[in-house]
Amino acid sequence: MSYKYKKNKGFTLVELIVVLLILAILLALLIPSLIGYITSAQKKACLVSKAGLLRDLTADEIYELEGSGKYDTAYLKSLAEKSEYKCRQGGAYDVSRGSDGSIVIVCGKHDKNYDFNMNEALSYIIANNPDIAKLIEGYMNKNIDSSSGTGKAYENLLNALGQAGFNAGQAGVNTWSFQGKGSSYYFYWTTEDISSKSPGDKVKVIRYNSARGTYTAGYVAVRRETLSASDSSDGKPRTYNVLGRSDSDWTEYTGVKQSEDDKKNYSKIYQIFKNMK
């Protein structure tokens, strides 16, 4: 009896194409999940590293200064550069002060911004810098605008913020305005850059009312102002955009109710501001 054996055949071209298509689909489904897992793991590792650096810097500051002072920002940054705690993706961390004066560690790769209270930063330097306290007292019926660029009062205030370790720009604050009103003041700040805005354009802001101790999310119209030569650090007058100063320029945001209790809570108002369009 004779037997005939069939010769085994390999995959046909059509079958190979089908297999490759299935593999491609599976990879397309798996890759986003894998990337998400890797990204999440990197962020967690970064958080652990930031916590280690914060612990070391805080302990060093307390030990070396015996709890009676604070390192300036430049020295904190130099310590961060030398530290073993770094982000594997973003490198050495940037260091500044939070609005309450605490040390803040920021990763250039994983941190976009953080919840920064400009009024707390202002209050901190007023309490700790006699020159700034005197400057603010003298501006109770005047205005200090970050958009002035060369304003003497602006530069003094900016330098004091920097020396204390506050970095508003790093926190995403692109424009702020101190507006003295008799014995009190309004303090506005926003993530928006108003330099290219047209007069009348509305920008979202947080407003602090020192008379009431309240924060409110709302909109302010952009206006044009001229800085006199005597108030300018370069001795030249300058016209620039400002956050409007009249009551008619201000509109409280009504998309979400802001109760009087809410307005005493900066974090609640910040969350409303963050979600405004």
Image (cartoon, rainbow, N blue to C red):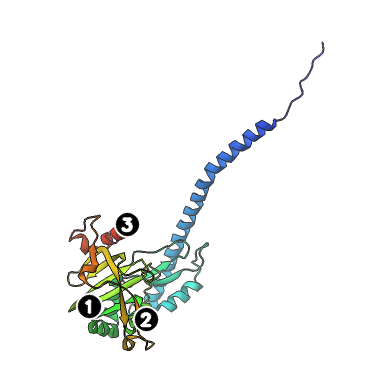
Pointer 2 residue: 159
**Residue 72: percent from left, percent from top:** 39, 79
- In the image, taking residue 29 as reference, residue 227 lies left or right, namely left
Q: Secondary structure at mark 2?
A: helix
Q: Residue furthest right?
A: 2
Q: Nearer the viewer, mark 1 or mark 2?
A: 1
Q: Secondary structure at mark 1?
A: strand
- Report whether residue 142 is seen: yes
**Residue 105: percent from left, percent from top:** 41, 67
Q: Nearer the viewer, mark 3 or mark 2?
A: 3
- Closer to the N terminus: mark 1 or mark 2? 2
* Mark 3 and mark 2: Cα distance apart in space: 31 Å
Q: Secondary structure at mark 3?
A: helix
Question: Which numbered tag is attached to residue 180?
Answer: 1
Q: Which amino acid type is marked by label 2?
A: Asn
Vertical placement of 57 versus 229: above or below? above
Pointer 3 residue: 275
